[in-house]
Amino acid sequence: MKFISEEIKKTDTLFGSFKYEFSLRIYEIIQRFYPTIQPSHEINEQLQAYAIAILNCTMSVIDKDRNYPLYRLEEELISMNKLTLKLSKIEENNAFSEAIHMQAKALLVNYFNFIYDLSSTGFRLLEKNTKLYNWEFVSSFESFSE
């Protein structure tokens, strides 16, 4: 039981560190593109929600990649491809969105080395999921920052 408790604490510490650095790095990008935006409770809440969504989808994809049969991963990837295809047309040439997406992916790789163990389908599924949450964050942020 002590081992499980220690592992939970390690995971909580890792997730806390990720959320903190994630919020910090994404906020730096916000400041680069929107220099007049000041820190606020609303921005912080959005950043925390985005970080949690990225963590959850990453852990979900890793679990699916390890435990689901390939055909189920492929079915989900097909669905995500259809959804993100529509989003990619909306987000074309959006440097702000792309900068945030690239930073989120870099942080995931820095914090979760086991991403390198994903199958090619799992990796593409993770990419699509992170892109979906990127679009959600950017859309929400841009709607209240205008």
Image (cartoon, helix red, strand yellow):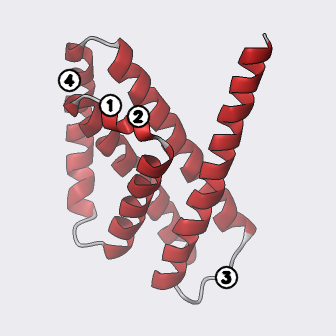
Q: Give the alpha-carbon distance from disc 1 to disc 3, as whole Å.
A: 39 Å
First in sequence, mark 3 or 2: give its number: 3
Question: Where in the figure is residue 20, as x and y percent of width and height?
Answer: 66, 57
- Asked if residue 146 is positioned above or below residue 4 in the image, the reply reads below
How crowded pointer 2 is (Cα within 10 Å; few <14, some 14-19, many 20+) is rated as few
| Dot 3 and dot 2 residues touching (CB under 8 Å) | no
Foreground disc of the pair 1, 3: 1
- Asked if residue 43 is positioned above or below residue 85 in the image, the reply reads below
Please name the residue shown 61% across and 67% down the image. 24
Q: Amino acid at mark 3?
A: Gln
Please give the residue where the numbered disc 2 appears in the rendered image.
114
Local secondary structure at mark 4: helix
Q: Which quadrant of the structure image shows residue 62?
A: top left
Local secondary structure at mark 2: helix
Q: Which quadrant of the structure image shows residue 3?
A: top right
Q: Give the alpha-carbon distance from disc 3 to disc 2, as whole Å.
A: 36 Å
Please give the residue where the numbered disc 1 appears in the rendered image.
117
First in sequence, mark 4 or 3: give its number: 3
Farthest residue, direction bottom: 36
Q: Give the alpha-carbon distance from disc 4 to disc 1, as whole Å.
A: 17 Å
Question: Where in the figure is residue 102, as x and y percent of width and height?
Answer: 36, 61
Please give the residue where the numbered disc 4 appears in the rendered image.
74
Residue 38 numbered mark, or none: 3
How crowded pointer 3 is (Cα within 10 Å; few <14, some 14-19, many 20+) is rated as few
Farthest residue, direction front: 3
Please name the residue shown 22% across and 16% down the image. 70
Local secondary structure at mark 3: loop
Question: Where in the figure is residue 75, as x and y percent of width and height?
Answer: 22, 22
| Dot 2 and dot 1 residues touching (CB under 8 Å) | yes
Q: Give the alpha-carbon distance from disc 2 to disc 1, as whole Å.
A: 5 Å
